[in-house]
Image (cartoon, grey):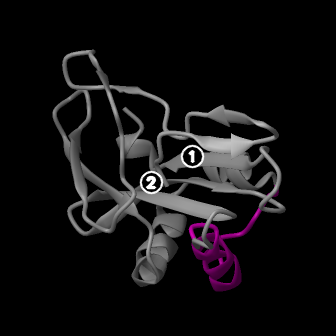
Amino acid sequence: MSTTGKECGGETRACTPPVRGPHGTPESLDVASDTPRAIALEDGTPLALRLASSGDSERLRRLFYRLSPATIYRRLFLPVPQVPHWAEYFATLAARDGDLRQAVVALKGDEVVGFANFAREVATTCEAETAIIVEASDAG
């Protein structure tokens, strides 16, 4: 997921934006592996970031049921009931498919408390739909 640059419409663009480390200094957030990367929230709560995997489906369904209806609405733009069909759909949002779809999960212990993803329509476009969702108790 992270490279030094990506050819896109004739120009090379950085693929991984810098993030701030624990002391406010720029830091690269390379989570392009299944190995979790330890981070800490501002309050010191430890989290781990890693690429989403097919083994996260049940964790994502549990996350769906912990989200408020307002949070689900802001993510899906639909007034979705918290029923198994929608929980299953929600879990598929973190599926990965090469360069077209990628997702990173945030774990607190063994539970997914958030995820970020992007999805592109075709591999030749520079545009992608992106979304981040975080459980309210961990939105910090």
Foreground pick, 19 / 1:
1
Return the residue at label 1: 132
Give left or right: position of 44 versus 78: left
**Badges 1 and 2: C-beta atoms under 8 Å apart?**
yes
- In the rendered image, which residue does mark 2 sit on? 114
Find residue 24 and report its image quarter. top left
Label 1 amino acid? Ile
Magenta segment: does it hold 8? no
Instruction: Say which residue appears at 49% left-offset and 55% top-offset.
Output: 1
Residue 10's place in the image compared with 22, above or below, is below
Mark 2 falls on what kind of element? strand
Q: Residue at x 47, y 82 (%)?
A: 54
Camera-side residue: 69 or 41?
41
Lower position in the chain sequence, tag 1 or tag 2:
2
State the residue at coordinates (25%, 27%): 42
Residue at position x 57%, y 71% in the image: 96
Q: Mark 1: which secondary structure?
A: strand
Q: Residue at the top extreme?
A: 24
Quadrant of the snapshot with the C terminus: top left
**Label 1 neighbour load within 10 Å: few <14, some 14-19, many 20+:** few
Separation of marks 1 and 2 at Cα, in angstroms: 7 Å
Give the magenta-colored segment's residue range: 78-94
Whole-percent x, y for residue 121 in the image: 83, 61
